[in-house]
Image (cartoon, rainbow, N blue to C red):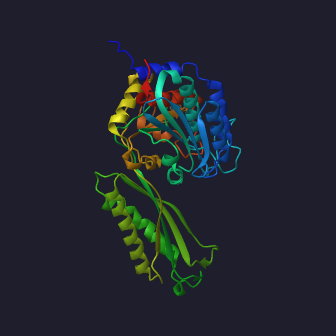
């Protein structure tokens, strides 16, 4: 039985039939060669702004620091916001790609260069085909997603006062998996993230006379070990949570017992209740171990960067997912359940604006087929380079489809002209 594609799907296929793929791939390679860290995305923002202006968008730079906003008003109809994050990571690239990063210690290891390319391509296609739809488009190049600062900075700089307020927000993210899949979750899709720093205060001294000191390194080690019981013994099995100690640092020489030790950890949770209980456990454990060690003062415990849960509007996400099925094929769209990764995109959904956020899998076919556990999805996913890996290298074949997902998503909401 053959079904007739919806107007949104049909129009999206028409508007993306002749994308300037070579130019978009060149843009991606250029962005990948020149990664910029959070709130320093000046060159990236400039390239995106130039592309939006050429496509006919009213373009403003410097929103929330280095953010870019392009607006295209095209008659009466809904207002749709398409967002791409722009920042890179402090990672040394090891891909050996001919277009690898030229910036020492900095890499687009999360695919944000691909996101910017997708947004630029979608902007071009939708502007060129403006006679096929009505409404208003807002294109947002967002800084500092990796640090959780960018979305809030743009809001604080008047994003919804200076520019039209959207009726729907759409965004997507490159992800590991065989290129050509478009996972959607009509609800919770990304977890909350919380950074915590702990400073243990001891009494320093000579390594040959530990009895005259209070060793913060030993105390910190006890804290790290005890923290491993928080998830296994204080979080219900039905609740998903992760606690990772990413940094433990202290001291300057082999034979000096330092005065302080620092622990930096990260929590991933899917509810505020679990987050609050884990934070309470962290405080209790840190304070208890310092008390047991006889530390001269209580530990410093500071909650740092936080990311909200990402919860799709079920109705909107199902509508966009259905359009993607029509455009790419039924088997390409599936529900993988919520991920433990985190995003700051939900900050843009002030006053519960509806949004849809989905993934685009980008692992090259040769890398996927060569991965351990061929035929078992989860085993292969664990074997291929993922986001934040120094080997993360999306397939160039996903440039055009990623543009098509944004175009078809936008047309699902905009008024399509028959």
Residue at 57% of width from left, 85% of height from top?
Answer: 209
**Residue toward you, 57 or 405:** 57
- The percent position of residue 165, horizontal first and vertical second, equals 45, 42
Residue 204 pos. (x, y %): 57, 82
Q: Is residue 346 above or below residue 3?
A: below
Q: Is residue 111 left or right of residue 166?
A: right
Q: Residue at x 29, y 53 (%)?
A: 237
Residue 234 location, x and y as percent? 31, 62
Q: Is residue 173 shown to the viewer in this render?
A: no
- Residue beneath the point at 54% across and 87% down: 212
Location of residue 361 with respect to 194 vertically, above or below: above
Q: Residue at the spot x=43%, y=77% of the render?
A: 290
| Residue 190 percent across, percent down from the top left | 41, 46
Q: Is residue 56 above or below residue 222?
A: above
| Residue 165 left/right relative to 98 | left
Image position of 203 (left or right of 279): right
Q: Quadrant of residue 393?
A: top right
- Quadrant showing the N terminus: top left
Q: Is residue 102 found left or right of 48 in the rendered image?
A: right
Please tell me which residue lies in front, 200 or 408. Answer: 408
Find residue 259 and report its image quarter.
bottom right
Q: How many marks?
A: 0
Is residue 379 in view from this perspective? yes
Residue 242, quarter of picture: bottom left
């Amino acid at each position: 039985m053959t079904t007739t594609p919806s107007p949104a799907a049909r129009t999206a296929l028409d508007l993306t039939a002749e994308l300037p793929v070579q130019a978009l791939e060149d843009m991606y390679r250029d962005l990948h060669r020149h990664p910029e860290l959070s709130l320093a995305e000046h060159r990236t923002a400039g390239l995106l702004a130039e592309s939006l202006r050429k496509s006919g968008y009213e373009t403003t730079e410097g929103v929330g620091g280095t953010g870019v906003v392009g607006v295209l008003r095209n008659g009466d109809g809904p207002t749709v916001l398409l967002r791409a994050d722009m920042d890179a990571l402090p990672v040394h690239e090891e891909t050996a790609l001919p277009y690898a990063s030229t910036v020492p210690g900095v890499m687009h290891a999360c695919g944000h260069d691909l996101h910017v390319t997708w947004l630029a391509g979608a902007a071009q296609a939708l502007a060129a085909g403006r006679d096929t739809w009505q409404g208003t488009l807002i294109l947002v190049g967002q800084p500092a997603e990796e640090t959780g600062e960018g979305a809030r900075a743009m809001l604080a700089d008047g994003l919804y006062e200076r520019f039209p307020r959207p009726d729907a927000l759409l965004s997507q993210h490159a992800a590991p998996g065989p290129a050509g899949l478009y996972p959607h979750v009509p609800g919770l899709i990304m977890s909350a993230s919380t950074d915590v720093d702990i400073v243990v205060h001891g009494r320093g001294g000579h390594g040959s006379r530990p009895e005259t000191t209070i060793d913060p390194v030993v105390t910190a080690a006890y804290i790290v070990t005890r923290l491993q019981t928080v998830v296994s013994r204080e979080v219900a099995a039905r609740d998903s949570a992760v606690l990772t100690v990413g940094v433990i640092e202290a001291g300057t020489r082999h034979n000096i017992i330092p005065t302080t030790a620092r622990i930096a950890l990260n929590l991933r949770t899917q509810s505020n209740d679990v987050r609050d209980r884990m934070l309470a456990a962290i405080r209790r454990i840190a304070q208890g171990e310092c008390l047991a060690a006889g530390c001269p003062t209580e530990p410093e415990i500071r909650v740092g960067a936080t990311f909200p849960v990402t919860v799709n509007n079920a109705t909107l996400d199902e509508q966009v997912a259905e359009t993607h099925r029509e455009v790419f094929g039924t088997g390409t769209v599936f529900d993988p359940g919520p991920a433990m990764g985190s995003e700051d995109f939900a900050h843009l959904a002030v006053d519960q604006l509806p949004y849809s956020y989905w993934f685009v899998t980008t692992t090259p076919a040769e890398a996927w087929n060569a991965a351990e556990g061929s035929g078992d999805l989860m085993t292969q996913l664990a074997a291929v380079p993922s986001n934040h890996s120094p080997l993360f290298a999306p397939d160039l074949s996903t440039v055009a489809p990623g543009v098509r997902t944004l175009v078809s998503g936008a047309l699902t909401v905009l008024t399509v002209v028959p």
